[in-house]
Amino acid sequence: MADEREGTPGCGYVALGANLGDPSAMLARATSALDGPGLRVLGRARLFRTRPVGPIPQPDFLNTVVEVESTLSPLELLDRLLQIETTLGRVRAERWGPRLIDLDLLALGTAQVQTPRLTLPHPELARRAFVLVPWAELAPGFVVPGTGRTVAQLLAALAPGPDEVIPLP
């Protein structure tokens, strides 16, 4: 695959999730924090309530996806997302555990990246209804790099499972 500088800077998508404290307020703060040098929020899907993934009992999540315009490289954008998480109080304690905020880079332009720190597009996105449902609301026609399929097609192909993705009013 390509290194972190290949791909077309520009349109990207970031998944946001939270299930501790006031998740709705945290998602709003994270969305605002995404606006800055080299990065601008273009749009956001509505909020969805979803069940947590993994074996750890915890509260339901609120999830959304935002569309961004970026002049940053994929690794620079990853670093920005991790910095925002830290600034907002995220502590990485256990995998699949509850969290104040989670920001995942789903795709950035046509970039296909495989490094020890980052894989683009996000390797789990096609299996996650909590990502695909809000993403399909925001950008159903976006062709996910390396798949030849749109977000809407990936969502339609998702096997039915126990995921409940409930839109909030």
Image (cartoon, helix red, strand yellow):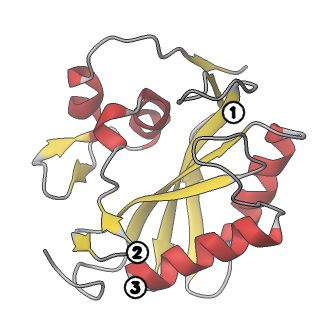
Q: Residues within 10 Å of mark 2 (few under 14, many from 20)?
A: few
Q: Secondary structure at mark 3?
A: loop
Dot 2 and dot 3 residues touching (CB under 8 Å): no
Of labels 2 and 3, the one closer to you: 2
Amino acid marked by disc 1: Leu
Mark 1, residue position: 62
Determine whether 138 is above or below 5 in the image.
above
Of labels 1 and 2, the one closer to you: 2
User: Which circle's residue, 3 or 1, is located before the other in the chain?
Assistant: 1
Q: CA distance from mark 3 to mark 1?
A: 28 Å
Amino acid marked by disc 3: Ser
Q: At x 68% / y 31%, what residue is drawn?
A: 61
Amino acid marked by disc 2: Arg
Q: Quadrant of the N terminus?
A: bottom left
Left or right: residue 143 versus residue 103 is left
User: Which circle's residue, 1 or 2, is located before the other in the chain?
Assistant: 1
Q: At x 41% / y 64%, what residue is drawn?
A: 12
Name the outermost residue toward the right: 21
User: Which circle's residue, 2 or 3, is located before the other in the chain?
Assistant: 3
Mark 2, residue position: 117
Q: Position of residue 159 (x, y in %)?
A: 26, 16
Name the outermost residue toward the left: 148
Q: CA distance from mark 1 to mark 2?
A: 26 Å
- Number of dots carrying numbers: 3
Q: At x 53% / y 30%, what residue is drawn?
A: 54
Q: CA distance from mark 2 to mark 3?
A: 13 Å
Q: Quadrant of the C terminus?
A: top right
